Amino acid sequence: MGPVTKEEILQIFRDSGALLEGHFILRSGLRSRQFFQCALALQDMPSVELLGKALAGKLRNYSPVTVLAPAMGGLVIGQEVARQLGVRFIFAEKENDVLVLRRGFKISPNERIVIVEDVVTKGGRVSEAVAIANSHHAEVCAVGVVVDRSNGNANIGVPMESLLPMTVETFSPDNLPEDLNGIPAIKPGS
């Protein structure tokens, strides 16, 4: 079987109900007509394995020894990518709304790390994870994401690999198109 196609990935999202349509408040504060609820796509282990294998394939040549994922979104896919690569998996989690390393996780100087996340819009959580690794003098080799909805605008400072680059319109809450003005905004969580 060849590499997974973008259409096959989109079908996983459609079949699981993970590709939502409506008026959504993104973690970045921007608004959108579409929302990728990756947790729904990643509740099915064959999908996790397929997506993890595809993302690991994009990250393998960076030769990481550790996968670092921002919680919550990166946990499932990050662990699977680490499993597929045969490397260590750690995660950062929120403490007072800031990502931090907890639970005794350590990062060594010069440790080769890839950051794995489910969805990127502006790259805020990924940038926080990169900063954590950098603060320990690790070498952040790359970022891997399932869905890149940044339209190429996420500037993280390291190479970013994605399975599904999407061009998704986002809007400032004070500059909404007419169709979204008439729909209540929901914050589905990430």
Image (cartoon, helix red, strand yellow):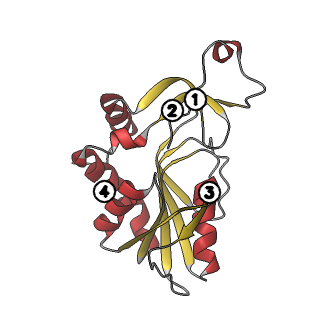
**Badge 2 or badge 3: first in the primary sequence:** 2
Q: Identify which residue is drawn at 49% across, 44% down.
A: 190
Q: Amino acid at mark 1?
A: Phe
Camera-near label (2 vs 3) is 3
Horizontal side, residue 58 vs residue 125: left or right: left
Q: Identify which residue is drawn at 36% across, 55% down.
A: 76
SS under mark 4: helix
Q: Is residue 169 above or below residue 47?
A: above
Residue highlighted by disc 3: 97
- The x and y percentages for residue 21 are 49, 23
Q: Amino acid at mark 4?
A: Lys
Residue highlighted by disc 1: 24
Horizontal side, residue 94 vs residue 43: left or right: right
Q: Are marks 3 and 4 in contact (CB under 8 Å)?
A: no
Q: Amino acid at mark 2?
A: Phe
Measured Cα–Cα span from mark 1 to mark 2:
7 Å
Measured Cα–Cα span from mark 3 to mark 4:
31 Å
Classed neighbour count for the residue bearing mark 3: other residues with Cα under 10 Å, few (<14), some (14–19), many (≥20)? few
Camera-near label (4 vs 2) is 2
Residue highlighted by disc 2: 35
Which label sits on residue 53? Answer: 4
